Each structure stands twice: as C-alpha cells, then as structure tokens.
Image (tube, rainbow, N blue to C red):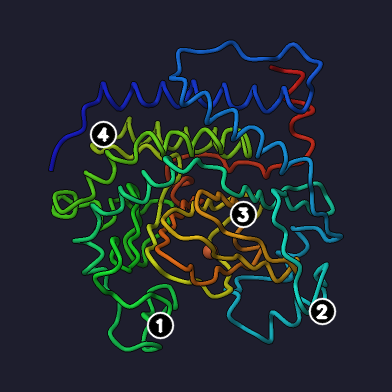
Amino acid sequence: MTLPNLNHFHSVMAFEAQVAQYLYCLFLCKLEPESSLYPALLALPASIIGECQWMASVIYEAFTHPISFRWSSHEYALDLGKQTGMNCKKEEEMEALFPPLFTGDLPICKDPFVIVDSTGMVLMWQLPSLLCWSRQMAMFCAALSLNPLMRTSGKPQVPGKCGSWRNDPAYFKAPSGQYKVTPGVLNFSPAWFQLGHQGPASSLGVSATLNAKARLLGTDQWLNDTIHSTAIVNAILRVIHPRLYAYGRRGREALLADGMDMNWLSIYTGAAVISNRETPVHRDTQCWVGWYDLLVSAGPYRYAEMVLPSIGIRTPDLPGTLSALSGHTLPHGVSEADGERVCYAFFMRHKVSQRLGLRLAEPMMADHYLRARRSV
Ligand SMILES: [Fe+2]
C-alpha cells in the first residue's frame, strides 16, 4: 500500500476547481450569449480547454431539449415506496397511475436531453459521448488494474442462484481471454456502514475493496490512474447539479479532516466499477429523490442502449456517455454491448452524508441557472 502524496492530491483538487468554474461559465455563456460572463482562460492545458468546450456544448444541448412529463416526482415517490423495479405488479400499477409518454415500440432519443417533472425538477441528464475518446479510454484502461480483484468479486457460480441480479453471472459476458477487463463488479466506498449498522451513531469504515490488501492488489493504482478523470466528472456535476456537488465536496472535506489516507477524489460516497455486464430494468432504492447517480460508459464497443420505461424512451449508451439520473424515481436498464464496456457508477448515500453531519442537498430545478446567472 502506498500512502498518497498529499501535495499531489491537493493540486488535483485545485485542478478540479479550475475546470469546474471554467466549464460552468462556458455553459452559462451558452445560455446567455450576450452576457459578459465569458470566462478568462485559466492556466489549463489546451487539451483540457478543448474537452471543456465540447462538454459545455453537449450539456447546453441537453438542457435546451427537455423531455417533460406531467407528474411530480414527490407524488410519484410517495406511491412508489421502496420498490426495486423488480415487482412487475407494482410497476404495472405505477404505469397506470403515471403513464409513460410512449408505449409499445419505444422511440430512440439520440440527442442529448434532460427529463423534467411537472414541478421543474430535473430528474436526468443524458449526455451522449460527453467524454472524448482518449478520456473514456483512459478510464477503461485504468480498470485493468482491478483485474485481480474482479476475478474474486464474488459472482456465484450458478446463474439465478443469488440474492441480487447485480452479481448474477447470467448478466455478465462469459470470462475469456478476449476481454481485457475481467467481467465482474466491484463496489468502493471510503465511508461504509457495517452491515446492519446504519444508525446516526454507527461508525464508518472503508469498503473491503479499499482495505490494505485490496489497495496493494490494484485499488491504489486504479485510484491514481483515474484521479484526473474523476476531477473532470466532479466538474461536470458542478454544472448539472451544483447543490449536490457542493454537498459532496463538504463530505469529502469531512473525510479528509478525519484523516482519509487514500486518493479518493470523487465527491460521491461510493462508486461501482461494472465490467461487461448488461443491466436489467431496475430502480436504485438508495438514490434520494432529486439527486443523481452518475453513470459513465467506457470501452472499445460500438453500441449499447439504455431503456427508460417509465418515460417510454430508449437512448444510445455510446462510449463516453454520461447519464446522471435519479435512479429510484426513474427505472432504467442497459443492453449488452457489442464489445467491451466498463461502467463507472458513482452514487451518494444520504445516510453516510448525514452521519458526517451534513444537511441534505436540495434537488436540481430547471430554473436554477436563472438565479445563478445573477450571482456569477
Ligand atoms: Fe441503476
């Protein structure tokens, strides 16, 4: 296990802050081109400036192409309860109460979009090919360091004979020499409750994938190899959900003040690396209404597709696509890719953040930028 170089960690945090501010101002300029908000060129490498300009364009395209529906997320959540998306009868009831926009042969939405509810809450940003080829391939290649852990990631041997679809081998490509990243799923968290102990006074520890042995086996290498990409992902959240970003930063600061001794840069409290798995339609019960789980698809493949049945649409999940979605309110699934696909899924557990003493972040509202433009 190698202890992180704190100077390096703080310099990457400063890089993240610069990228976040630059990207945010670029986006606001697109919303209000006549304004004088155009950001000063910071001391960022030309390649990063190019990435930011592309990303600001995609984010702007999404924001200006909303898919609106007539129901309120809070009312929907009250009827939904703790459903996982796997109870067909309950899902049929929900569909009858809150009909999707389309049924039958669902249309494919290829362009960037946001999904907005009747109260103006932004429940999803779909940002196809947001990350450039080199960025997403860097994230894919970094996952190679996790192969020793992926091989022992606890997939049961018999399809269907497990507690959760998430590690059911029926959904993974068969392990073989043709895949660079071993099919499997690993969950990481620098602040993790022990099983069955999630109370306000329960202690937090690192996940097994971040213990000393796992770090030697590959986790430290993976954290180091993804640190700049994680900074970019954090900066994107700064634009698409500023309140959740600020909230996550406070959580990261709390962990640093508590002596966190690894290069965990994500402002999320956890991440999963999912290699070569298709994903059946499901809901993520722990995603707070109005917050986003953040999914990044990476790898040498040409096509996969996400389905959003409660809206009634499909959307391509191409390499470099970033989907930020309220994963409990919006059931979602992803088809098998026609090549190698690794998904980085970042998630925020509100109980962890509450344990760290933080007040919950408000949801993202579509009128947020009206107020933001006045204050920049
Ligand atoms: Fe999910």
Q: Residue under circle 4?
A: 259
**Kind of residue sitting beneath label 1:** Ala
Q: Say which of 193 and 61 sits in front.
A: 61
**Kind of residue sitting beneath label 2:** Ala
Residue, x 75% and y 22% (percent of image)?
A: 373
Image quarter of residue 343 = bottom left
* Structural distance between the alpha carbons of marks 1 and 2: 31 Å
Callout 4–callout 3 Cβ contact below 8 Å:
no
Q: Say which of 206 and 176 sits in front.
A: 176
Q: Is residue 260 left or right of residue 340?
A: left
Q: Say which of 364 and 133 sits in front.
A: 133
Which secondary structure, mark 1?
helix
Q: Is residue 94 left or right of residue 345?
A: right
* Structural distance between the alpha carbons of marks 4 and 3: 31 Å
State the mark number for residue 325: 3
Q: Is residue 32 left or right of residue 216?
A: right
User: In front: mark 3 or mark 1?
Assistant: 1
**Kind of residue sitting beneath label 4:** Gly
**Kind of residue sitting beneath label 3:** Leu
User: In front: mark 4 or mark 3?
Assistant: 3
Residue, x 77% and y 28% (percent of image)?
A: 31
Q: Residue 319 placed where, x, y %?
A: 50, 53
Q: Residue under circle 2?
A: 96
Up-down relation of residue 212 to residue 285 (above or below): above
Q: Residue under circle 1?
A: 170
Badge 3 or badge 1: first in the primary sequence: 1
Badge 1 or badge 2: first in the primary sequence: 2
* Structural distance between the alpha carbons of marks 2 and 3: 22 Å
Check disc 2: other Cα within 10 Å, few if <14, some if 14-19, many if 20+. few
Badge 4 or badge 3: first in the primary sequence: 4
